[in-house]
Image (cartoon, rainbow, N blue to C red):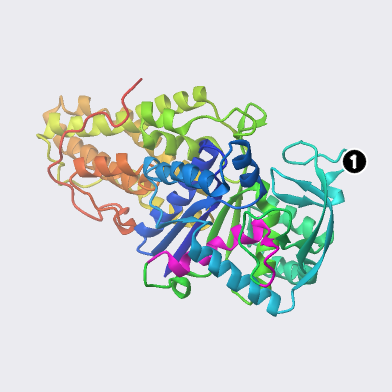
Amino acid sequence: MSFYVTTPIYYVNAAPHLGHAYSTIAADVMARHMRQRGEDVFFLTGTDEHGEPVALAAEREGLTPQELVDRNAPRFVDLMPRLNVSNDFFIRTSDAEHMAKVQEILGRIRDNGHVYEGIYEGWYCPRCADFKTDAEAGDDNLCPIHKTPLTREKEDNYFFRLSAFQDDLLRLLDEQPEFVMPRHRYNEARSFIESGLQDVSLSRSTFTWGVPVPWDEKHVFYVWFDALLNYYTALSYAREGEDLTERFWPAQFHLIGKDILKFHAVFWPAMLLAAGLPLPEHVFVHGFLLIGKDKMGKSAGNAIDPFAIMDEYGTDALRFYLMREVSFGHDGSVSLEGFRARYETELANDLGNLASRTIAMVHRYRDGVVPDAQLDPDLAAEIDGLEGEVRALLDRADLTGAADAIWLRVRRLNRYVEERAPWQLAKDEARAGDLDSVLASLAEALRVVAVLLYPWIPESSAKLLQALGAPQLELASARVQAGRLGAIAKLDQLFPKH
């Protein structure tokens, strides 16, 4: 089976921050897990390089828009290996191949009768690159996201007949209640559609930085129509000489932030319907990372630098923190203090000490060879169902629930060490068989946990499995006694204390 997952594409008018890392790591956890299952996976991320925000940022710096995006896009490209993410392609919407495909698909939408010419007059947020309805503008005419004044715009545009798809979209949500996830975001999308859809601008005629409208050279496509199509266009040219569209489309999961829900849960499926293309299975909407009560972001000036955290603590620590600290699908606060606390208590103490103690005891009491002994049946039963539990949770993009389930077992293994006290068993030769069983049970359970943790902390999991002499990462190996442990290597601290 194929599995296609995407992140939003990121604006290039500022440096990457923790919010960009959050979405990308989440998609990587899903992609790595699905590869462990033997699925045919494609994972896409990239940069959104057109539109008025980019043009304005370039103007402020005395650059052309192309110069600005060519300078800033490599920062996002470079972020991917630093985050140890396994994306299969990085799309830039200034790619000539993307732009040609956008023109083709939007031309098809026009040919299908869903585009007409008119004059737009209304509210607009330059920072969102979004036209706002009167209801969204409210009485104060402020952007509901940025809380900045909206501008009044009037210009010649081509329009997309979004209103024509209101009944189709409501039917979609009725028939596929998990099209938008989690449920509270589904309700938000449905409420927006039920409030009445208005036709939306498909093009802009007041600036030139965008994909040219092929049937009218005075216009460029409105940036959101260009950007949303990246999920589809990338497949046509991601691999030289090969079109992957039939193999991977439609996507299983688009992961997005809640501030762009309207575009992905309303505009996007309507566009695909208008073009006669299959719809994705799920749009999963995560919340904001908050500093205190405020959204973290470049415009707020409160962004945490992911590079600084990785430089000091390592990439796995950042990946783990972001997926554990905030319930995926909801807003949540992050802080350097919270990061350090979770690093010390969970990574260094819970997992790091468990790994060190288990391997050290096998070396101390059994010369570095895991005993070929009967496993503790009670402990084995607690560990053995974990693979299926994690599989089911990640099928619903419940990254937090899956990590929680694994961590319950990590803590259980630490309690097991204290309960069985191998150091006491080692003092009594008559209990050598009990000690063999405890050590074998701990080592095998640790191996299973390491396989399942691989999508979250790939470097540390691989290092631990290598030390255990069982480097297999396939999900099928995350079952008790899927393989036999023998001689194991010594292991340095996975997560040194700071």
The vertical placement of 394 against 17, above or below, is below
Q: Position of residue 438 (x, y in %)?
A: 24, 37
Which of the image's four quarters has the N terminus?
A: bottom left
Q: Residues within 10 Å of mark 1 (few under 14, many from 20)?
A: few
Q: Is 294 or 36 nearer to us in this picture?
A: 294
Task: Decide if residue 192 is on the left or right side of residue 354.
Answer: right
Q: Position of residue 107 (x, y in %)?
A: 64, 74
Which of the image's four quarters has the C terminus?
A: top left
Q: Position of residue 257 (x, y in %)?
A: 61, 47
Q: Position of residue 215 (x, y in %)?
A: 67, 72
Determine if residue 402 is in view. Answer: no
Q: Quadrant of residue 226?
A: bottom right
Q: At 15% across and 42% down in the image, what residue appears? A: 371
Q: At 44% across and 57% down in the image, what residue appears? A: 43
Name of the residue lying farthest toward the bottom: 112
Task: Decide if residue 303 is on the left or right side of residue 116.
Answer: left
Residue type at numbered disc 1: Asp
Name of the residue lying farthest toward the top: 498
Q: Is 312 or 285 nearer to us in this picture?
A: 312
Magenta residues span 215-239
According to the picture, the residue beneath numbered tag 1 turns out to be 139
Q: Is 434 or 493 nearer to us in this picture?
A: 493
Q: Quadrant of residue 166?
A: bottom right
Determine if residue 56 is in view. Answer: yes
Task: Decide if residue 63 is on the left or right side of residue 490.
Answer: right
